[in-house]
Amino acid sequence: MKKKKIIIVGAGPGGLACGMILASKGFDVHIYEKEDKVGGRNGFIQAGDYKFDIGPTFFLMKDVLEKIFNLCGRDLHKYAKLVDLDPMYKLVFKDKVFHPSTNEEKMIEELNRVFPGNAENYKRYMAKEKVKYEKLIPCLEIPYGKYTDYLSMNLVKAAPYLDATKSIYEVLGKYFDDEILKLCFTFQAKYIGMSPWKAPGLFSMISYIEHGGGVYHVMGGLNQLSLSMAKVLEEFGGKIYLNKTVKEVLTKDGKATGIKLENGEIINADDTVLNADFAYAMKNLIPEDKRKKYKDKKLESMKYSCSTFMLYLGLDKVYTNINHHNIFFSHDYKKNVDEITENQVVSDDPSFYIHNPSRIDKSLAPEGKSAVYVLVPIGNKSKGISWEERKAKYKEKIIDLLESKAGMENIREHIEEIRVITPDDWQNNMNIFQGATFNLAHNMGQMLYKRPHNEFEEFKNCYLVGGGTHPGSGLPTIYESGRISAKLIMDKYGVKFDS
């Protein structure tokens, strides 16, 4: 049989996962990427001698990517060096500092120090959430392209564990009474760009994923994962074309037929995989008159995640008082979260995250210096806030907080390089609809069958990967979207998946 040609629009982690599997199984894979490097938000920024991950800095559920490499006959650990972090991170509140560990003995010791009397509650949490995790994960490995997928035995068995009518915060209330301790196990809702008071209770398993499976750093930055995947794809003959902007996904008679590049070149394929931001792709790559379900009005009415204000700082020193991962909480965290997700206003007292990988990874900055990444969750562009007008002032505000709240003394004197990304930049430069960094929101009305399908429902021979399709946002689930779509394509052509 002649090799089936697959075009993938975008070399982000979902597209790379799908592409490497298909290439390893004998498909003719061609990825077209508008940037000069692979990775998308899982790529990197080079600022002088300093290197920064653009987006993800937490690597969780490494088994998902290990399995994808294994499907291709490859070993992830021969392509990337992973370091298990312990403690996982430092959590800083107004009058408490907490260092959670994946080691039960250390974790109980830390709980007794900061939240005495909660050791048994923690053990109960770990035991029950482990069962929930084991029941729910298999449910995320099928595509939900039809209503009958809801009748899968895995989902039927998992139904009692969904906590569909509760929020993450309410679920954690079953285990802990202390309000601050609850935040230590619910702030992870930010990984999907949502409020813990709004995100569905099934996502309580995210904190279990950390505590039960660990948090990892990838030497050289998490961007090395995308580079490793691209390498595997090319080893199997797959092609990646950089600096190639796709202008349109071409369709005929209800089928995707290929793509048109910005330079006018038309490239045909048997199947097309979209790895662009979902709403951006709909509005910009597919003419509205060819869309039946996802018209512009529908896209505008959908719910989207929050955005982020980013600082990338090349410093001529290493702040040893700043851990690898650090989260500094607003004094009124719920108010701060509501400002981000409900009211869409810029908070006067923001929470923020600092990534300081140069403590253990000397490849990101010159000797004695550090590449520091700062993320501030903020509202997306749906309310029309212009960041050009406030970018400089807000940058200075965050640097003030790094000095006053994080203890990074005289930080301005040590800045050699600085880069800033605002919601405007996410929207205009990274092609992210409304600057919603974590894509479509993960409310129950936009999950499973109700999320855009992996086998795209608008027309045949088109598949979706990335945070805007099932299973959702976050690196592990994005990888899983690539695996699901690859399997759908292979099933279509009768190619065995596991061989």
Image (cartoon, rainbow, N blue to C red):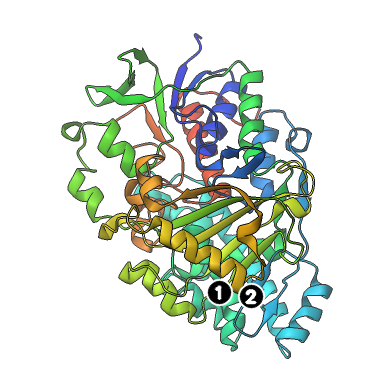
Q: Is residue 406 above or below residue 269?
A: below
Q: Amino acid at mark 1?
A: Phe
The image quarter containing residue 134 is bottom right
The image quarter containing residue 67 is top right
Query: Is residue 257 toward the left or the right of residue 178 in the image?
Result: left
> SS of the residue at dot 1?
loop
Residue at numbered disc 2: 92
Seen at 54% across and 29% down, the residue is 37
Instruction: Report the disc number at residue 280.
Output: none
Among all residues in the image, which is located at the extreme right?
105
Name the image quarter holding the C terminus: top right
Residue at numbered disc 1: 329
Residue 153 in view, yes or no: no
Q: Position of residue 222 (x, y in %)?
A: 65, 44
Comes first in the chain, label 1 or label 2? 2
Q: Nearer the viewer, residue 450 or 362?
A: 362
Q: Position of residue 380 (x, y in %)?
A: 35, 57
Residues under numbered marks 1 and 2 in contact, where contact means CB atoms less than 8 Å apart:
yes
Assess disc 2: are there few (<14), some (14-19) or many (≥20) residues with their C-alpha within 10 Å of its C-alpha.
some
Seen at 73% across and 61% down, the residue is 319
Residue 299 in view, yes or no: yes
Query: Is residue 285 toward the left or the right of residue 2 in the image?
Result: left
Q: Nearer the viewer, residue 19 or 142?
A: 19
Q: CA distance from mark 1 to mark 2?
A: 6 Å
Q: Amino acid at mark 2?
A: Val
